[in-house]
Amino acid sequence: MGNCSNNTKLRKKHRKQASSTITIDLALEVKVGSVKEKSPSKISKSLIENSLKNHYLFSDLTSEDLNFIIGSLKYYTIPSKEYVFQQGDIGSTFFIVEQGKLEVIRNGIKKTILQKGESFGDMSLLTDFPRRATIKTIEESALWGIGRDAFRYLVHQINKRSLNIIKAFISQLKIFSNLPEDQIKRLAEVAVQHQFKDNIRIICEGDEGVLLYIIKEGEAVAKLQGAEKFRLIAGEMFGEAEVLGDDNIRKFSVYSVGDTRVLSLSIQNIHEILGENFKEVIYKNQARNSLLSSKYTKHLSRDSVNQIIEKFEWRKIRPGDLPLESPVDVRAIYVVCMGTLISEKLVYEDHNVIGIIQKKKDKSLDGVSLKAINEVVLGIITIDKIEIITKMHWDDLLQQLNNMRILKKIDFFSVLSHSKIRYIASVAKHQSFEKKEVIFQYSEDAKTIYVIKSGKVKIHYHGKKLRILGKYEIFGDNCLQENTRSTNAKALKNTKCLIITGENLLEVIDYETGYKMQKTKSYLSCFYLYELLLVREIRKTKEKYCFLSFVNEIQMFYYVEVIEKNKVITKGIFKQLLHEKSIAISIEHPLILRLVKTFSDSEFIYIIYESFIVNDFSVILNKPLTEEHAKFMAAALLSILEYFHERNIIYREFNPLTLCLTNYGYPFISNFHSAKIVRDRTNTRLDVNPYTAPEMIIGEGYTKSINFWNLGIMIYQFLYNTLPFNIIKSDHPFDMSNKILKNELFFPSNSKFIRANELISTLLQKDYKIRAGLDEVKYSRWLDSIDWQRIKTLGYEAPIKPKITFNRQANLSKCMSLTRYVHEMTKKDTSQCQIPQKISKNLNWDKFF
C-alpha cells in the first residue's frame, strides 16, 4: 500500500473517548423521580418481551434470556418535564417505556417522541460512548431499566449461540482473507449481530461513527440527503471510514432492504485486534463504494469492480504536494477515498470517481491539474488495466455501461439479471431519426425493439394516433409475437434510439420477463373490435356504458367504455374526449389506468383500457394509518405525481375523492377527467373540495404546485384521520374556501410525527412560490428511508391490501360479441325514446377514434 500504511491518528483529538471501565450504579444515571426493584405484571412482561424481540439486537431472544432480564429489571417513575439523561452523559441503562411520553432531543433539535413499548439507550451501552441525545419526559412516565452488565451479558449470550456461524462467515470474507486464524476467532467473539426489518435505518448521515458494519444476510442501500448512492450485498462493509478515519462523521445513511442481518465491530476491538493493518481494507472498501455509486461504473459486475480495486495504486497527497495531472491526459481513473481535491472550477470529495468522460465533446478535464486542500488518499488505475480486466476496449466499455444505465431505467427490463442486461447492452445498436422520419411501417418485417434515448415517437395505424412515446419508453416489441408490424412508427422530433433485435432478447427471456412482456401496450393492443366479448356490464351512466370484456385469442380481459356518438352533442364534449385520449395514450405507469386502443363504428366509440381491479380509496381512511403505511402511500402518490409532472400533466383533483386503491394496496388513477397538460400556468376553475389549493380558489391561475398541496392534505389525513384547517367534509363550499384561505395550520398536541409535520408544513404553504416541490418531498427527512426503486417497480408489500371480490364469468366460450350486445341494447333504449338524437356529421370520429 506504499505511503498509505504510515501511522496516522485513528480519531480526531476532539472525539469523545469511550470509557473502558465504567462502574456506575444504575440509579445514578437518572437523577430525578424514583427507582425501585419491581416484578413486572403479566401484561408488563408481554410488553417487555415484545419490545425486546422487536429490537435489532434481541430478535433471537429465548425464554431463558427473558427470565434473566426479568430478574434484573428496575422500575423508574419520572415526573413530567424532567431529563432521563442528557446528550454527552455516560450511559449505564437501557430503557423500555411502560407508560407516558418522552421526547428525543439532539443538538437542541426535537427528533421524535417515544411512547409505550418503545426502547432507548442501547448504543451507549454497546459502544461505551457518551449518550448521543437527550431524553426528556413530556408527561409523567414509567420506565423499565436494564443495567449495563445485564444488557451486555444478554448481547453476549445471544451472539455466543451463533459464534461458529459468525466465525465461518468472517473467515470467508475477502476483506479478511489474509488474517490469521486467531484474529478471525477474536473478531467473531467481539462481533455483535443485529437484525433489521425492511426499511430500517442502520446508520444516519451526520452521526458520529462508532461502529463499522458488515452485511451478513440481505441487502442495504446507502443514501446521501435522501438520494440513493449505492447498494450493498452480503459480505460488504459500510461505516468503516468514519470509524477509523480522521473525520468520524457519517457521510451516508444506510437502510435495510428486506430483512437484513449485519455484524458490527467497535473502534476499540478493531484497533486492538487488527491495528494499522486495517487501513488497506478501509481504502479498498471506500474505492468499491465509490465505483458502485458512480454513474457508469455502478453498472460493472461486482467481480469486475473487485478485480479493478485489487489493481489500484494507492497514493497519499498532502496540501503543498505537487498537483496531479489530469486523469484524461494519462489515461487513468482516480478514486477519492478520503480528502478533497480541487481544480480551477471543480471540487472532488470522498467517493468521487474522476476521469470517466462519456461524451467526446466534454473538455472539462483536459489539461486540468488537481490539488489537495487536505490529506487525500487516492486509488489510481490506468485505463489499460481496466481494458485487460473487462476484456473490452475503453470506448466500447463506456458505451456498454451507458446502454445498461438506460436499460435499467425501463420497467420492461427490470426483471432481467445484471448479466442478462449486460448482454443486451453489448448487442444493442444506436440509431438516430430525423423529425418526421418513418421508423417502420405497417406490414414490414418485425425484427427489432426500439428504446428511446431522446426525442418523441408517434405510433399510428390507418391515420389514427395510437400512442405518443418519449424518453426511456419502448416500442416495436410486438416482434416478440408477430412476424410483421401491425402499426406504423414515426419520429415527431429528432430522436435517438437503442435498437435490440428480437432474436437477441428472446435468448435471455425467462418466465418473469415473458409475463412482463404481456403487460406492454404493444401486446395488449393485438386484437380487433369484433374480437371483444362481453363478460359483464359494470355500470351505466348518462354519458357512457362500462363493460368487462375479453379477447379469446390472447386470453386478456379489458375494461371498455362505450359512448354513443349521438350523445356527444357539442364540440366542447368532443374536444374533452380528445383531450383525455391524448393524455391517456402517452401514459405507461403501473399506477395509472392505461389506454390500450380505441375503435369507432357507425354509432359508438369504444375506448379500451387494461383491465384493473380496484376499491374505493376511502376503505383505508376510517382510522389513522400507521406512520409506515402513511409513508408508503405518500411515496406511491409522489411516484404518480413525478410521472405526470415530467409530462407537464396536472391532475387537478388529486385526492381520495378521485383516487382508487388496487387489490395489492397501492393508490391508482382510474380516469383522466381532471388531467390537463399545462406548460406553465392554467386558470381552469373546478368545484371547491377539502383538498383544493388556495390559488385555485383565488382564481389567479395555478401551476403543478397544487398537487403538492393535495399531497400535504392527504398525508395529514392519513396520520390524524381528520382534515387540517378545521375543515369538515360537510362544510358548505363557501365556508370551506374561507377555512383554506384564512385558517392557520396546526397539529394535534399529542402528535409524535415530528418529521411528518415538518414536511406537511412545507407542503401546506399557502404561497405556492415557497411550497415544497418534488425534490424537497422525495428527499425529505420523513421519506428518507423510502426505496424509490421498489416504489417504481411495486416491489414494496403494502401494509394493507383491501379485500376485493371479483367474479369473472366462468364459461367465457358462451360470451356474446360486445358490439352486438351494445347495438341490441341501444335499439331497445331508442325504441322507448320519443325523439332519437342524430349523430353530428361535423365531428371526425374515424380520424381520432
Image (spheres, grey):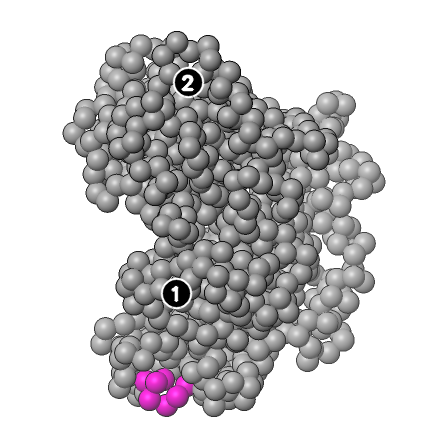
Q: Amino acid at mark 2?
A: Lys
In this view of the protein, which residue sits in the foreground, 243 or 625?
625
Residue 264: x and y in percent read 63, 58
* 325 drawn magenta: no
Badge 2: few (under 14), some or many (20 or more) residues near its Cα, within 10 Å? Answer: few
Establish if 170 lies above or below 135: below
Establish if 443 lies above or below 132: below
Residue 428: x and y in percent read 49, 73
In this view of the protein, which residue sits in the foreground, 294 or 254?
294
What segment carries the magenta color?
326-332
In this view of the protein, which residue sits in the foreground, 504 or 159?
504
> Within the image, what quadrant is residue 39 found in?
top right
* Residue located 70% across and 31% down the image: 814
Could one spot residue 11 in this view of the protein?
Answer: no
* Residue located 56% across and 67% down the image: 502
> Within the image, what quadrant is residue 219 found in?
bottom right
Badge 1: few (under 14), some or many (20 or more) residues near its Cα, within 10 Å? Answer: some
Earlier-in-chain disc, 2 versus 1: 1
Of all residues, the one furthest to the left in this rendering is 700
Left or right? Give the position of 681 relative to 762.
left
Could one spot residue 666 in this view of the protein?
Answer: yes
* Residue located 77% across and 34% down the image: 71
Q: Which residue is mark 2?
A: 542
Q: Which residue is mark 1?
A: 439
Left or right? Give the position of 30 relative to 736.
right
Residue 686: x and y in percent read 28, 24
